[in-house]
């Protein structure tokens, strides 16, 4: 009798563990990646998984290019960024514009956004040469892409 009760408890406990495990597997398969986008190792030009992110940077890029055309250099301070991008959310400590990390030098600028724990998307303009770079962040090489026309 005592052995039967222990056996019943063990079977019930194993059933609960299996149910929790299966629930975790199903949730993990259906839920989005908790750190954002997962790394993509097979990206190509006009990749639909990246174009939406790039399109959100287009207004920022246009205003920064316009400033460069007028001043022959990109904005180089927080105050200058606010003047160029008055409708954007700019953080002064990291020079972040609407979630895009802004870096500059005398020849151009870079906008970089983390897409998850590892991957990032970068736009670079250097002396009228512009390109997008997707870095999966998992040790595989970054890829230069054509994302927008």
Image (tube, helix red, strand yellow):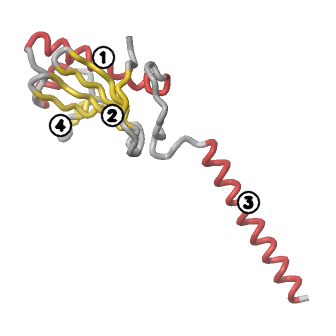
> Outermost residue, bottom direction?
2
Task: Report if residue 35 is visible in the image.
Answer: yes
Say what secondary structure mark 1 lies in.
helix
What x and y, as percent, mark residue 59?
A: 30, 16
Who comes first in sequence, dot 3 or dot 2?
A: 3
**Quadrant containing the N terminus in the rendered view:** bottom right
Say what secondary structure mark 2 lies in.
strand
Say what secondary structure mark 4 lies in.
loop
**Quadrant containing the C terminus in the rendered view:** top left
Who comes first in sequence, dot 4 or dot 1?
A: 1
Q: Which residue is mark 1?
A: 59
- Residue 30 lies, with reference to residue 43, above or below; the image says below
Packing grade of label 1 (10 A; few <14, some 14-19, many >=20) is few
Mark 4 or 2: the one toward you: 2
Mark 4 or 1: the one toward you: 1
Packing grade of label 3 (10 A; few <14, some 14-19, many >=20) is few
Mark 1 or 2: the one toward you: 2
Q: Which residue lies at the image location 49% right of the left edge and 22% below the top edge?
A: 48
What x and y, as percent, mark residue 36?
A: 46, 40
Say what secondary structure mark 3 lies in.
helix
Q: Which residue is mark 4?
A: 92
Q: CA distance from mark 4 to mark 3?
A: 49 Å
107, 141: nearer the viewer: 141
Who comes first in sequence, dot 4 or dot 3?
A: 3
Q: Which residue is mark 3?
A: 19
What x and y, as percent, mark residue 128?
A: 19, 14
Q: CA distance from mark 4 to mark 2?
A: 16 Å
Residue 113 is labelled as 2
Please indicate whether residue 106 sits to the left or right of residue 25 in the image: left
């Amino acid at each position: 009798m005592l052995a039967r009760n222990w056996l019943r408890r063990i079977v019930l406990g194993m059933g609960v563990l299996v149910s929790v495990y299966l629930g975790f597997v199903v949730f993990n398969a259906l839920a989005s990646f908790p750190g954002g986008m997962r790394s993509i190792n097979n990206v190509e030009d006009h990749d639909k998984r990246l174009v939406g992110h790039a399109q959100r940077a287009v207004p920022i890029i246009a205003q920064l290019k316009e400033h460069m055309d007028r001043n022959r250099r990109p904005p180089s301070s927080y105050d200058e960024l606010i003047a160029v991008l008055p409708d954007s959310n700019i953080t002064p400590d990291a020079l972040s514009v609407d979630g895009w990390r802004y870096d500059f030098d005398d020849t151009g600028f870079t906008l970089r956004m983390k897409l998850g724990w590892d991957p990032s998307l970068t736009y670079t303009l250097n002396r009228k040469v512009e390109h997008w770079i997707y870095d999966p962040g998992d040790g595989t090489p970054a890829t230069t892409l054509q994302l927008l026309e």
